[in-house]
Image (tube, grey):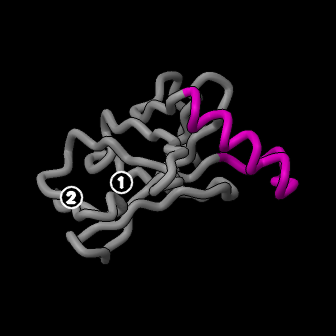
Amino acid sequence: MTETTISSPITLTDGAKKHLERIREEQSVPEHYGLRIGVKGGGCSGFSYLLGFDEPKEHDNQYDFEGIRILMDKAHGMYLLGMEVDWLEGLNNRGFIFNNPNAEETCGCGTSFSA
């Protein structure tokens, strides 16, 4: 069973929320899907971030952040606690940015870290 918690250990900026809502609409993401945020082994610095819409799984915690359901594997919380997800729209870069206070080192691309 999944566990539902009121407050989210992750925050999303207004820019990230708007872009995620646009993705959900453009890709016709089913209503029962939530935003999966997690980590996986790999990347330049040891861990890479996961971000995408997915169905809830058995080992997930579920959170609500201002109306957006966030899904996170219970084992990933220690790596992501306090993280902020932002959306960058610039001339040289465009994409999601992960501001993670638990990262000891990050790589130049900003999508991997070590803890």
x then y, percent, for residue 98:
38, 47
The part of the chain drawn in magenta is 14-34
For label 1, the crowd category at 10 Å Cα-Cα, with few meaning under 14, some 14 to 19 and many 20 or more, is some
Q: As shown in the figure, which amino acid type bears the numbered disc 2?
A: Thr
Whole-angstrom CA distance, mark 2 to mark 1, is 17 Å
Judged left or right of residue 49, residue 4 is right
Pinpoint residue 82: horizontal percent, then vertical percent: 31, 33
Q: Residue at x 31, y 75 (%)?
A: 43
**Residue at mark 1:** 76
- Whether label 2 touches label 1, CB < 8 Å: no
Where residue 64 sits, quadrant-wise, is: top right
Helix, strand, or loop for circle 1? helix
Q: Is residue 84 left or right of residue 52?
A: left
Label ID, residue 106: 2
* Dot 1 amino acid type: His
User: Which residue is at the front of the view, 68 or 111?
Assistant: 111
Q: Is residue 110 magenta?
A: no
SS majority, magenta: helix
Q: Residue at x 67, y 55 (%)?
A: 53
Decide which of 78, 28 is in the foreground and name it.
28
Q: What's the residue at 20%, 70% (across, down)?
A: 45
Residue 3 place in picture, x, y as percent: 54, 39
As drawn, 110 above or below 35? below
Task: Assign a secondary structure to mark 2.
Answer: strand
Q: Is residue 38 above or below residue 100?
A: below
Q: Position of residue 89 (x, y in %)?
A: 54, 45
